[in-house]
Amino acid sequence: TRIRGALAARGDAEAARQLSADASKSGCDSEDVQVKSEALSALAQADPAAAMPMLKRVLDRRDPCLLELRRRSLSILLRRGDTAATSAAISVARASDEAISLRTDAVAFLAKLPGDNAISTLEELLRTSTEREVQRAAIRSLANTENPRARQTLRTLIERQDVSEQLRVEAIN
């Protein structure tokens, strides 16, 4: 897979096709998932435009067997740091049927992404999510950014009396 990735990066169309085929295979074997992950990563480096739809398809699959592959796909997308990455992170963060660990990973990255849309999503998750882990991840994400709006959101959260004391303490720390 690594060799094919290097060849694809140098313009080898057959190597890129094989990487796409490897990334598209189905299965639950951990070794198979690792191969898919490496294939997606190599394809994303060699041809980001071709990798984008594949990464989104992987993220759309809710198979618990593919959780690590989906986490890797999210990570690859987030490295782009563009609006597509922001949209993908927002989609995963908002999906209540999503694995909680993947949601909290997406939430953690949101404040690092460009645009106010990410901050708005974090504010929304603080207000509407009933999952403590997601709320805590949103607080940590807001606290780890220099965005003035994020700082104001945390100040407002700390002052609110209708929010649990535990979350307010988390926002202070």
Image (cartoon, rainbow, N blue to C red):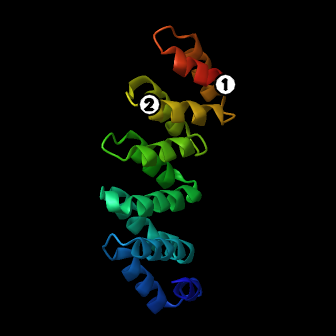
Q: Is residue 141 left or right of residue 105?
A: right
Q: Which mark is residue 59?
A: none
Q: Earlier in the sequence, mark 1 or mark 2?
A: 2
Q: Is residue 124 left or right of residue 172?
A: left
The residue depicted at 58 percent of the width and 46 percent of the height is 113
User: Which residue type carries mark 2?
Assistant: Leu
Q: Residues within 10 Å of mark 2 (few under 14, many from 20)?
A: many
Measured as percent of width and height from the top left, residue 159 is found at 58, 10
Q: Which mark is residue 173?
A: 1
Q: Residue furthest front?
A: 30
Secondary structure beneath label 1: loop
Tell me the quarter of the image containing the C terminus: top right
Spatial separation of the CA atoms under disc 1 and disc 2: 19 Å
Q: Is residue 126 visible?
A: yes
What is the number of callouts on the image? 2
User: Which residue type carries mark 1?
Assistant: Asn
Measured as percent of width and height from the top left, residue 118 is found at 51, 39
Q: Residues within 10 Å of mark 1 (few under 14, many from 20)?
A: few
Viewer-closest of 164 and 128:
164
Measured as percent of width and height from the top left, residue 119 is found at 54, 34
Viewer-closest of 106 and 130:
130
The residue depicted at 50 percent of the width and 38 percent of the height is 117
Q: Is residue 14 left or right of residue 137?
A: left
The residue depicted at 38 percent of the width and 58 percent of the height is 59
Q: Is residue 24 left or right of residue 166?
A: left
Q: Is residue 162 above or below residue 36?
A: above
Q: Is residue 152 visible?
A: no
